[in-house]
Amino acid sequence: MQQTRISHPFLDAAREVLPEVVALRRRLHRIPEVGLEVPRTQELVLDAVREIGLEPTPGIAVGSVTATIEGNGPGPTILLRADMDGLPLTEETDLEFSSEHDGRMHACGHDTHVAMLVGAARLLIDERHSWPGRVLLMFQPGEEGFHGARFMLEEGLLDQSGGERPSGAFALHISTLYETGTIDVRRGPMLASADTLRITVRGRGGHASTPHTAVDPITVAAEIIIGLEVMVTRRVDVFDPAVVTIAQVLAGTTTNIIPETAFLAGTMRTVSESRRVALRADIRQVCEGIASANGATVEVDIEPGYPVTVNDDAFTELVLTAATEVLGEDAVRRLPAPIMGAEDFSYVLQRVPGTIAFVGARPPELDPAIAPMNHSNRVVFDESAMAAGIATYVGVARRFLSGVA
Ligand SMILES: [Zn+2]
C-alpha cells in the first residue's frame, strides 16, 4: 500500500516509532473503559506522556489528560485531539490482545487515536527546535455519547496551553470504511448532529374487541412513524437534508388489551444547525397534530446530542496539502458528502477553526463490502495505518505552526 512506496521524512519517522505505538495501542486495547471516568486508560496515557518528556495534567471534572509541547519560540498554538473511551460490547475478534473485559471493547479505534497522538507528540518533541509556537495535546474520555469534549472545554481546556489559546484544532478518526493509510476529509459539514427522540403517545386503554370505547395509542404511534418519514421527504430540502429514524417501538402486554400508552424512540440527524432547529419543531408539530386528530395526547422529548461537526474551509485546505505532501496524492481524497455519524469534536470546532479527518485502516485482505465497521464486535483495524495518521498529525501541526498555508 501507500506507506511502503511513498517516502517523506515525517512518514519515515512515523514508521520508525510504529512498533512502540503499536505496543501502546495494544496495552490500551486490552483494558477498554466506557464513559467519562477511564482511570486505567488515563493512567496509561499519563505514563506514556511522561515517558516522552512532557508534564501531563489530569482532568478534574472528567478523566482527561492534557499536555503542552513548546516549540522554539513565540508563535500560535494548535490543539491536537485523541479520544480515549471504548464501547459497551463484547469483543469477538480473536486478536491476541483482545479486550480482557466482557462487555467492553475498543470497537471505534480510540485506542489507536491515543497511540497515534503519543507517537506524533514524540516526533514533534524530537524536532521542537525547528518549529515555533506550541502544541496542546487533548486526550478526552467520553466521546461515545458522554460529551467529554464539552466537559473539557468547560474546565478551561483552551486556556491550558500555557501560551496563546489554540487558533487551530485537528483530530483524526480511524475507520474501516476506507483503505488503509488514506486520509478522507471535506470542507464544511463533516459529521451530523445527533439528537435522541422519545415520544410517548397517551390514549385510553380498553378491550381489544371494542376499540370504539378506547383511544388506541398503537394506531396513533403507527401514524406518527409514517407521518414523520413523510414529513422528512415533503418538508426537508434535499440539499440541507435530515434523517429521522424510529428505532424502538414499545406498546401493549397481550392480544386482547388496548394499552394506555405507546412509546417510540429514535434519532434525528442533520448537517446544519438551522435544519436541526427547524426539524425539532417539525417533529413536534407532526406528533401533536396526529395525536390530536385521533383524540390522544403526546409527549415529545428531544434530548440534544452532539452538534454538527463543521470543518473550517481554510484549515481543511491546509490538511489536504499537508497530508498530500506526506502521504502522496493517491492517499488523500475529498469526501463528497458528510458522514451521518456524530462527533463531540464538534464542540471544539464551534470555538476553534479546525478539522477532523478520517484515516483509513481497512485491512487489505478484507472485502470492502463485508469488512466489519467501526462499532462492530468484530472490527479489526490495520495497525500500519497508524504511521499515516502519525505523519499526518505531524505534517498538519508543522505546516500550521510555521504559518505556511
Ligand atoms: Zn469514534
Image (cartoon, rainbow, N blue to C red):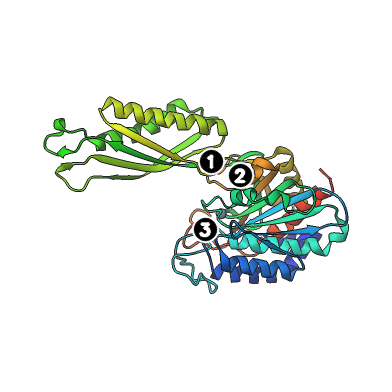
At 54% from the left edge and 70% from the top edge, which residue is drawn? 30
* Residue type, numbered disc 2: Ser
Question: Furthest residue to the left?
Answer: 209
In this orientation, does residue 7 appear?
A: no
Q: Is residue 266 left or right of residue 41?
A: left
- Can you tell me which quadrant of the image ligand 1 is in? bottom right
Residue 78 higher or lower than 205, as above or below: below
**Amino acid carrying mark 3 in the image:** Gly
Q: Residue furthest bottom?
A: 96
Q: Residue 104, position in %: x, y? A: 48, 64
Q: Nearer the viewer, residue 293 or 237?
A: 293
Q: Quadrant of the C terminus?
A: top right
Mark 1: few, some, or many residues within 10 Å (few <14, many ≥20)? many
121 left or right of 231?
Answer: right
- Determine which of the numbered discs, if any, sits on residue 332 in the image: none
- Image coordinates of residue 333 in percent, x first then y, are 67, 46
Name the element at disc 3. Answer: loop
Under circle 2, the secondary element is helix
Q: Which residue is mark 3?
A: 35
Q: Which is more N-terminal, label 2 or label 1?
A: 1
Q: Are marks 1 and 2 in contact (CB under 8 Å)?
A: yes
Establish if 249 lies above or below 374.
Answer: above
The mark closer to the camera, 3 or 1, is: 3
Cα separation, mark 3 vs mark 1, equals 20 Å
Q: Position of residue 79 (x, y in %)?
A: 72, 51
Compute the Cα span from label 2 to label 3. Answer: 18 Å
Say if disc 1 is inside 8 Å of ligand 1: no
Q: Which residue is mark 2?
A: 346
**Residue that badge 1 annotates:** 193
Amino acid at the residue labelled 1: Ser
